[in-house]
Image (tube, rainbow, N blue to C red):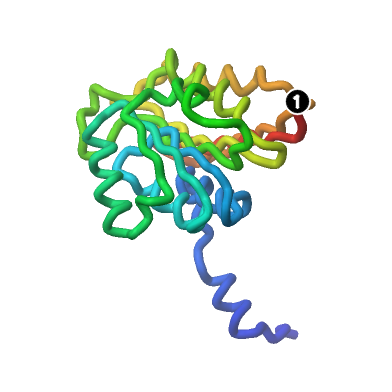
Amino acid sequence: MMIPQSESNATRCDRPLVLNALALSHQYARLLILPGDTVIDATCGNGGDTEFLAGLAGPDGHVIGFDIQAEAIARTTDRLQKAGLLERCQLHVASHDQMLERVKPGVRCVLFNLGYLPRGDHAIGTRAETTLPALDQALALLRTGGAVLICLYYGGDSGFEEYQAVLDYIRTIPVRQFAVQKIEMANATNCAPIFICCEKLKD
C-alpha cells in the first residue's frame, strides 16, 4: 500500500540536497548566526560571503572582512554598497593572520574560503604560513557556541601544501574545547573542496 505524501513533503524530498563545501558553510552559518552578532569573513574575495554574512548578522550586527588584495576589498565594497549593507561592515586590506589585532573576542562565526581570488591572479592565494596563525586567532576570538567554518580548496593552482597543513592542524585542536567536523565527497573524480567546522564547546 502506498502511503499518501503531502504536497509540501513531496516538494521537499524532490529537491536535491547540495553537499558542496560552500553550500555547507552557508547552511551551518544560517544555524549559527543571530541578528546582532559579530562575524568575520577571513577571505573576502569578491564579496559574496561578506554580503551573505551581513544579511545574517542584520542591521545591528557587525561583519569584519579581511583580504590581502586591494582589488578584492574594492569588489567587496562595491557589492556591499549595491546591497545596502556596507554600513554594518568593516573591511581591511590585510592578511587574516592580523585579525586578533583588529577584532575583540566574542565572535559568533569566522568563515574561511581558502584558495585564490576568482577572476584574479591565481599566483596570489592563501598560504599555510598565514592561514594556520589565522585559524589559531579565529578560534581564540570565538564565543562559546560559535564556530570557524572552512572551505578548503586544493589541487591545481591551489596546490597541496596548505591543504595538508590545515588537515594536520585540525587534528591538534583540543577535543575538550572544540568539536571538529570534516565533510568531503567520497566519489569525487577531482579535488573537490572539503568543508570543516570547528565549534567552540567551552573556554
Question: How far across and down, in percent of the image, does residue 3 sit?
Answer: 73, 83
Q: Which quadrant does the C terminus fall into?
A: top right
- Give the quadrant of the N terminus: bottom right
In this view, 89 is above or below 96: below
Q: Amino acid at mark 1?
A: Val
Query: What residue occupies the far top of the structure in this picture?
Result: 129
Which residue is located at x 47 percent, y 47 percent?
20
Q: Is residue 138 left or right of residue 80?
A: right
Q: Is residue 44 above or below residue 10?
A: above
* Residue 145 point in image, percent of width and height: 70, 41
Q: Secondary structure at mark 1?
A: loop
Residue plotted at (51% across, 35% down): 150
Q: Residue at x 65, y 84 (%)?
A: 6
Crowding near the residue tagged with mark 1, few <14, some 14–19, many ≥20 C-alpha atoms within 10 Å: few
The answer, for residue 192, to whether it is visible in the render is no
Residue 82 shows in the view:
yes
**Image quarter of residue 83:** bottom left
**Front residue of 182 and 141:** 141
Residue at the right extreme of this rendering? 176
Q: How many marks?
A: 1
Q: In the rendering, at what x and y percent does residue 51 appear?
A: 39, 51
Query: What percent of the width, then of the height, locates residue 65?
Result: 41, 37
Q: Return the residue nearer the eye: 101 or 154.
A: 101
As drawn, 167 above or below 202: above
Say which residue label 1 marks.
Answer: 175
Q: Which residue is painted at 57% across and 41% down in the image? A: 109
The answer to which of 41 and 25 lies nearer the viewer is 41
Q: In the drawing, does residue 116 fall left or right of residue 26?
A: left
User: Compared with residue 168, is residue 31 higher up or lower down, i.e. above or below?
Assistant: below
